[in-house]
Amino acid sequence: MKLSAQEEYGIRCLLHIGRTTENGGSSISVISQAEQITPSNTAKLVRILRLNGFVESSRGKDGGYRLARPAEDIVLSDVFEVLGGKLFGEGFCDHYAGASSVCAHFDHCTVRSFWCAIQSVLDHVLSQTTLKQLMDPTGLGWWETCLTANPLLSKPVNK
């Protein structure tokens, strides 16, 4: 399983903007340099974030990009939705039907059930995690929420 570059870099841009919002925001060139992303790709990602209400921009000497709302109000599931969508969503089986127009396993598909379960876990964790938790300098701000939201994560696996 892979995250797309757009999702990874978009989250990194949003984190950078979140960390610099209190200091007046950040420009495309500063974000690009700090995150080692090309300026054109940074501009594209920040535009997506701005059009979807996560960041706002202002011009002038103290201008730049800053969060459009508090970091604790930005839920990661919403961010991932605009940056790339779901790992497994509607139309997945239509897209990967093979040479046929309908998947040969459509009636009874254990793989589809598996992907639905994985998506459910991802949705649960992402919907319980805010940008503020991800900005925690200890790196543990989101983990407590995950454990609280999903006790299965804290139980040892029996073999």
Image: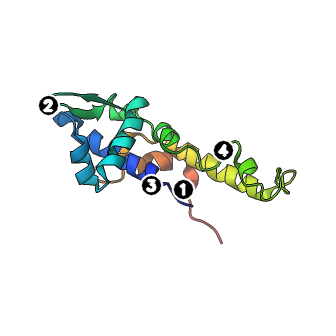
Mark 2 vs 4, N-terminal side: 2
Mark 3 vs 2, N-terminal side: 3
| Mark 2 surroundings within 10 Å by alpha-carbon count, few (fewer than 14), some (14 through 19), many (20 or more) | few
Q: Is residue 88 left or right of residue 54?
A: right
Q: Are marks 3 and 4 in contact (CB under 8 Å)?
A: no
What residue is shown with label 3?
5
Q: CA distance from mark 2 to mark 4?
A: 42 Å
Q: CA distance from mark 3 to mark 4?
A: 19 Å
Q: CA distance from mark 3 to mark 2?
A: 30 Å
Instruction: Residue at 72% x, 55% y: name it.
Output: 96
Q: CA distance from mark 1 to mark 2?
A: 44 Å
| Mark 1 surroundings within 10 Å by alpha-carbon count, few (fewer than 14), some (14 through 19), many (20 or more) | few
What amino acid is at disc 3? Ala
Q: How is the image coloured?
A: rainbow
Q: Nearer the viewer, mark 1 or mark 2?
A: 2
Mark 4 vs 1, N-terminal side: 4
What residue is shown with label 2?
62
What amino acid is at disc 2? Asp
Q: Nearer the viewer, mark 4 or mark 1?
A: 4
Mark 1 vs 3, N-terminal side: 3
What residue is shown with label 1?
153
Q: Residue 74, image x and y in percent?
A: 41, 34
Task: Name the outermost residue toward the front.
Answer: 40
| Mark 3 surroundings within 10 Å by alpha-carbon count, few (fewer than 14), some (14 through 19), many (20 or more) | few
What secondary structure is found at the residue carrying circle 2? loop
Q: Residue 95, image x and y in percent?
A: 71, 50
What secondary structure is found at the residue carrying circle 1? helix
What residue is shown with label 4?
89
Quadrant position of the N terminus in the picture = bottom right
Q: Are marks 4 and 1 in contact (CB under 8 Å)?
A: no
Q: Residue 57, image x and y in percent?
A: 27, 29
